[in-house]
Image (tube, rainbow, N blue to C red):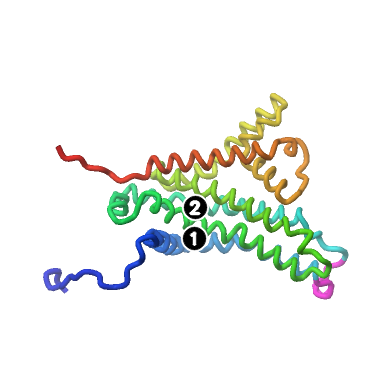
Amino acid sequence: MAVYKRNYRAYAGPVNPARWRWLVITRHALDEVFSSRVTTLLFVLCLTPALMQALIIYLVNNEAVATLVGLRGPGPSIGPRFFFITLQIQGWLALFLTAWIGPAMISPDLTNGALPLYLSRPIARAEYVAGKLLVLLIILSAVTWLPCLLLFALQAGLSKAPWLGPNLFLASGMFAGAWLWIALLALLALALSAWVRWRIVATGLVVAIIFIPSGFGAVISAVLRTKWGFLLNVPVLLSRIWGDLLRVDIGRPISELPVSAAWLVLLAVSGVSLMLLSKRVKACQVVRG
């Protein structure tokens, strides 16, 4: 049909309440993220270790099935260290998933000049950032604390001995520790997406910012024989915090690092990322003289 034969009219369908309109950004961003088969494959792979852990929990708590499949002797202990390792595995898988998804969140809007169109609607800067941020929060939650808590519930349901009450701190510890990591990854990825327009470069930077300072921190700790070099080592800081939350002894010299210092460093990185993101995400203003 030719363009001049089309009859255009205003949209007459249902309208979202003003305070929830920013969720439209989240909905369309989620559709865009999972339109890629690579993203779907990575998401499924991130859940595979949790399925293996669930199988281990089932076999440990079911002697008949363990004997049937040929497993003999006592299985692994399902306790703090088991869930500590599970949280570590899911946490680091979340890092690589973020490195793939995060750089495509804001960069296309800035490159194609779409951000002023967003902000010209009844959507504030904070709501735009919240809409993009919620995408990462949902996806990373699905591969971190959610499978960890499902494994916790599975163990609590299958255990013959009273297990839930004495180990309830594991659930709260995994939830808090995972959210700290999710917040850091999400804010860092969005900040890099806003400042670096090349996706492949931003993807590399997400991983590099986590691991490259770790090498400098290890050198400082070894040369100066001090524990404070670990403050540049994000994996060590996470292990220190997660070990404290789950009551797992991670050994010296990492255990000598104050937990409060580890929290402060990671929160500071998140704060700096949020500041850089806020500085970059803004509408263009045209002043006519």
Residue stretch in magenta: 62-72
**Above or below: residue 68 compared with residue 220:** below
Q: Amino acid at mark 1?
A: Val
Disc 2: which residue: 100
Which label was assigned to residue 38? 1
> Front-most of 88 and 273?
273
Q: How many marks?
A: 2
Placement of the N terminus among the 4 image quadrants: bottom left
- The answer to the question of whether label 1 and label 2 lie on touching residues, with beta carbons closer than 8 A, is yes
Q: Quadrant of residue 211?
A: top right
**Considering only order in the chain, which callout, 2 or 1, is on the residue closer to the N terminus?**
1
In the picture, measured across the screen, residue 170 lies left or right of residue 99, that is right
Q: Position of residue 53 (x, y in %)?
A: 71, 63
**Above or below: residue 247 compared with residue 77:** above
Measuring 82% from the left and 66% from the top, which residue is drawn there? 162
Measuring 58% from the left and 41% from the top, which residue is drawn there? 266
